[in-house]
Every structure is written in structure tokens, then in C-alpha cells.
Image (tube, rainbow, N blue to C red):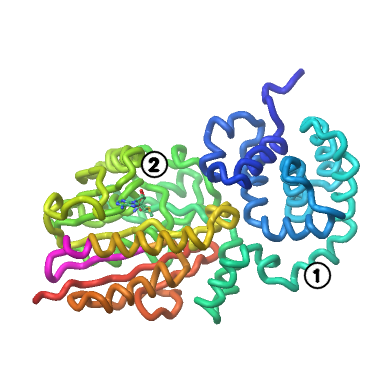
Amino acid sequence: MTSPYKISERLLAVQILGSLLQQHGSLAGLLDNNTLAKVQSPALLQELCYGVCRWYPRLQFYLQQLLDKPLRSKDLDVQCLLLVSLYQLLFMRTPDHATVNESVAAVETLGKSWAKALVNAVLRKAQREQADLNALAERDYSVWYAHPEWLLNQLKKDWPQDYRTLLDGNNQRAPMTLRVNARQATREQALGLLTSAGVAVKPGALSPYSLYLAQPMDAVVIPGFVEGLVSVQDEASQLVASLLPLATNLRVLDACAAPGGKTCALLEAEPTLQVLALDNEARRLPRITQNLERLGLYAEVRCADITRTPSAEFGHFDRILLDVPCSATGVIRRHPDIKVLRTPAEVENLVQKQRALLESAWPLLNAGGYLLYSTCSLLKAENSKQILQFLSAHADAEHIALEVAGTLACDAGIQLPPQTGGPDGFFYALLRKSLD
Ligand SMILES: C[S@@+](CC[C@H](N)C(=O)[O-])C[C@H]1O[C@@H](n2cnc3c(N)ncnc32)[C@H](O)[C@@H]1O
């Protein structure tokens, strides 16, 4: 009987990685549901694509050592096939002979029969010389920790004591975390319900609403998810509701709101808040509305860019959440393609954008009000340096110290490192506007 699936996981991974290396899309975009439905094992396809990205700088190094001369750019498919196969040989438990045989066979399907001997030779050499390859890789941190050199150097500069912990954290697999909707149940009640439904969870240490799943699963099959009992959200993101001082009936601006994870976390903690949720990307707004509806919450949702809209259109707010676009270097474990795609020039652009967002949001804050600035970045230029620069230019801005366990020492704000089985890498800074 012929397989109903048109393509093998290996060959589809080769196509997806080829697109990614040519800067055509992101992993999350390329691995959409339609694509996953093309193969028998979507989990294997994801493992191959995410695994190759996670270890890309190391795998590329191995490949350079194993090839007599570099492959031509028109043979990107052969390169991707070798990267996938090296990942299987060196990081997965796939039997070696199966990896080698299937990879050699895949060369034929790619229409590159000439590369059969090459693929066979490279993979067999990798098997034989694994220990020597590792010894060579260990000499170079960029290779060993599998981070692009510019990022490794920046992290080392920013965090001379802690950068290796951060690099390690970025290479772990991220846990799946739930936020319990306090409108519907206490965390203990939700834990009891999930446990009795056979879903193993344990509470997180930082957010009072967090539950960590022992095994990731499809959100929609989590008991209570559809009914709004729980949402999927990392524990670091959930902290927003603990760090922004809340009270009844405050007027709140969530200036970069889509897809609405933090809007909903705030409203679950204090449902009387009058929230205006803005985002400048119209296509991302429906996600905010869907999340609010599922959770039985209300916020005004609008498409707007506060850096371009006259402030009179919005009025003033008691609280502002500024969860700015950033390099996402704190969530590399969830999006390892950042290692392949992100450039230093992009980070510089983001720093400028964040500065503009801060400058535009500040006049919208009432005297005595609080602004919480957050990023999922580990880079000081986007975090403490950004805040220090803002404080030096705004005499009416006061820095309020925050306390969360496990953060790294910082000149302003708090920096959470990505933690194994714990929260993502995240930065928060709380500012208060003086009364006079
Ligand atoms: C980090 S994401 C926000 C995530 C969201 N707060 C959550 O927790 O679900 C940053 C968002 O900022 C939006 N954004 C970027 N520039 C913006 C601008 N100038 N005005 C409003 N939104 C902007 C992006 O479209 C993106 O949705």
C-alpha cells in the first residue's frame, strides 16, 4: 500500500531549512498546520527543523570540517540534507545506519545523484570522528554553545559573569506553561481538575497563576482550555500582572498588545480595569479579540501606532504596559531560528523603535501613574541601558525597584534568565511619573 503522505519528514525539513537559510520566513510560519499535515509524523518534522536551528552554528562547523571543499550555493538542498542528517546522527537517537541509508536515498529524490557518494562519505566520517569533532568544537564558544559570534560577543560583554548560563539556557527545550484564569478558579482548583483528568502539572515558583505541564500538548485538548479556565503563557510573561501595581477601575493602556497574552493576564488579575489594547498590525488584532472572548474578558481593541497617532486621540492612563517588539534573544529556546535570522542591524533598529515607543507612551501617563516596560530580550541595549537613557532624559520619571527571585543583577529593571524547566528570559522595568 502506498503512503497517503506525499513527502518524507527529512525531505520537507530540507525544503523548510532551505527557505529559512535564504531568509524566506520563520520556522513558526514555515511549519504551519498545512505543512505539518503533509507528513506522517509532524513531531519528527518539527524536531528536525527546530533541532537543526538550535544547533546550527555547531552543525555548520562540523560540516565544514567534514567536507573537502564547500558546497556550491546552488546545492543548498544537499547542505540542508547533510545538516538534518548530522543532527540525527549526533543529537538524536535515530539508528545510524537508518540515517545514512535514508539520507543517501534522499539525494536521489533531490535529483542530485552525483552527491550520493559525498553524503555517504560525510556521514560515515562524522560517525567515525565524532569525538575529534567535539574536541575541536569545544575550543570555540560560538561553535560549542551554537550561537552566532555577534550574539555570543554581545552577551559576553553584557553579562561577563553569567553569559554561559544564558547560552546554556537558550539551548534547552522550553517547557509548556499555563496561566490559570483567576476569574474561574484558583490555581489549586485548576491543578486538581487537570490532575484528575490525567494531565500532570506542577505550580511555578514566580507567578501565582502558573502551572507547568509535565508534557507539552495541543492547547485545545487541555481540559478547560476552550472554556477559558487556562491559557498557554510562559511564566515570565505572566509576571506582568504581579509587577504592574493594579487597583479597581484604573484606565490602562496596553500599547503593544497583540496577541493579547498580557492584556488578558492583567484583566484576569483585576477585571474592573478599563483597558485599551493597541497594536499597529491589523492582522494580529483578531487574536486579541479571540483570547478575550474565550476568557470572558473585555478590552477595547484598536489598530494604532502610538508613535504616529496624536496623543489627544487616546487620552490619559493610570497605567501603561509597554511590551515592546525586541530581539527575542530571551526566547531563543522557543524560536531557535533567531540564531539563523537575527542580525546586529536589526537589534539596532529595534532599540530605536523601543526608544520611540517609550517617548510616545510617556506623555499619555497620568501624574502618579506607572509604566511597565518589558522585553523578551537578554541584551542590555534593549533593556537596562534603554531605561537608564530614558531616565536621564526625563526628570519626571522615577525608577521603581522590582523584586523577583532568580533575576540577574541589573542597573535598572530586572533581568530573568531563561531557566531550565522555568521561565523565559525576560526584562521588566517599572517607572512612576512624579506628581508635580
Ligand atoms: C512583544 S509583542 C507583544 C506581545 C503581547 N504584549 C502579548 O503579551 O501577547 C510586540 C507587539 O508590538 C506591536 N508593535 C510594534 N510596533 C508597534 C507600534 N509602533 N505601535 C503599536 N504596536 C506596535 C507588534 O505588532 C507586536 O504585536
Q: Nearer the viewer, mark 2 or mark 1?
A: 1
What secondary structure predominates along the stretch shown in magenta? strand
**Quadrant, the C terminus:** bottom left
- Spot occupied by residue 236 in the image (x, y as percentages of width and height): 41, 62
- Tell me which residue sits at (28%, 64%) in the image: 358
Q: Earlier in the sequence, mark 2 or mark 1?
A: 1
- Spot occupied by residue 298 in the image (x, y as percentages of width and height): 21, 44
In the displayed orientation, state which residue is furthest to the left.
436
Taking the magenta stretch, the answer to whether it contains residue 363 is yes
Amino acid type for the residue under numbered disc 1: Ala
Residue assigned mark 1: 135
Drawn side of residue 132 relative to residue 363, left or right? right
Relative depth, front residue between 185 and 107: 107
Amino acid type for the residue under numbered disc 2: Phe
Query: Label 1's element?
Result: helix
Taking the magenta stretch, the answer to whether it contains residue 415 is no
User: Which residues are drawn in magenta?
Assistant: 361-374
- Tell me which residue sits at (67%, 51%) in the image: 52
Relative depth, front residue between 379 and 193: 379
Quadrant of res 247: bottom left
Kindly tell me whether residue 235 is visible in this rendering.
no
Query: Label 2's element?
Result: loop
Residue assigned mark 2: 225
